[in-house]
Amino acid sequence: MPVVFITTEDGTRGSGTPGSLLGGGHGHPLRAQGRFRAAAGRRGRPRPRTPVAQAVQTTAVGRPPRAGDPGQAAVDLALWTSRGKSPVCRCTSSWAAAAKARRSTARTAVVVHERARDGGGVRRVPRAGDDGVKMKIGHEDPGVDIRRVRRGPQGLGRRCLDRRRRQPEMGFPDGAAGGPRAGTAGRRMVRGAVVVRGYPRSRRLAAALDIPVAMGETLGSRFEFDAYLRAGAVESCNRISSGSAGSRDGQGGHSGGCRPAAGGAGTT
Amino acid sequence: MMESTIQVACGVMGSGPIEYMPWVAGAFAQAARIENGNMFPPAGPGLGLEIPEEILQRYRIE
């Protein structure tokens, strides 16, 4: 029969029994935020709201039990059981109400090179779907990336090709599967999100290719994209679709791309 | 998956953005609450996730 009931201010209830001390007591005081309403059961009258620090006096391990310890242990248990009914994150000493989220670019982040016929030649980029592959670039030596991209799908390596066989929906678009053809590989290849961290390397990469160098993944908002676009390091940015994260940043629709800033590499 | 890591992300201060994969949202009774780029942890006990019986039956491996 529980003798101590505790109800937190958000309505979570916990209970404890005096026999819990028989195991040896608790060595660590319970740290909790806020104030709890501690109400004794049949052994006492309800007490006013009491800070946890006063309501809980844990027993040191190894010290002989003293009168009153069972009651204290019961309060302990009551508090712990109430915390166990909370979300995991609230069991920590400090927690945030929310965390930044970004949408995964897997499966939907497919960048297809297209020149927009409106907007003065600004390249409009991503098209959502499973009809392309995601290729990550960002080698320390941009020459490696350039060579890989120019070699086309074969440059992705056996691992990627194996994956393509297992997942037909991830196949290359027609015309690109057989490898690049002079003057066409750039237009037919599909590029996915690319993390571009260093401006100089990225600029060199963007300048050397006739396909858009896209970026995304770790960037969360248009403000983060902006510096890269203005530096001419990339030509397009994956936009987050489905309204899940900040990269979407007020733009509607399911697919599309951030437009490069004026003077950026994306303008033609 | 993000539905479970959100609890850790909120419990650890300074956590970076976590990845949201919408194609797994159907595995849970309630969709994750995401507003303005922020994801909020479920308010239920523990992870706060509930997997419908129908989903369990569909993906059960004997």
Image (tube, grey):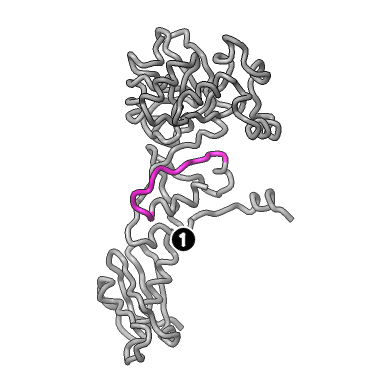
Q: Tell me: residue A265, above or below residue B62.
A: above
Task: Tell me which amino acid carries mark 1.
Answer: Pro
Q: Residue at coordinates 59% horizontally, 21% vertically from top-left?
A: A152
Q: Tell me: residue A260, above or below residue A225.
A: above
Chain ID, mark 1: B
Q: How many marks?
A: 1
Range of residues picked out in magenta? B11-23
What x and y, as percent, mark residue A119?
A: 41, 10
Q: Residue at coordinates 43% horizontally, 8% vertically from top-left?
A: A121
What x and y, as percent, mark residue A203?
A: 39, 21
The part of the image, by quadrant, that contains residue A128 is top right
Q: Which residue lies under the disc numbered 1?
A: B45
> Does the magenta-highlighted stretch encompass residue A189?
no
> Does the magenta-highlighted stretch encompass residue B12?
yes
What x and y, as percent, mark residue B7?
A: 43, 53
In the image as oriented, which residue stretches furthest toward the right? Answer: B62
What x and y, as percent, mark residue A250?
A: 38, 28
Q: Tell me: residue A9, above or below residue B23.
A: below
Q: Is residue B50 left or right of residue A20?
A: right
Which secondary structure, mark 1? loop
Q: Residue at coordinates 66% horizontally, 15% vertically from top-left?
A: A175
Q: Is residue A178 left or right of residue A256?
A: right
Query: Which quadrant, please, contains the C terminus of chain A?
Result: top left
Taking the image as drawn, is residue B35 in sight?
Answer: yes
Q: Is residue A177 left or right of residue A3?
A: right
Taking the image as drawn, is residue A239 in sight?
Answer: no
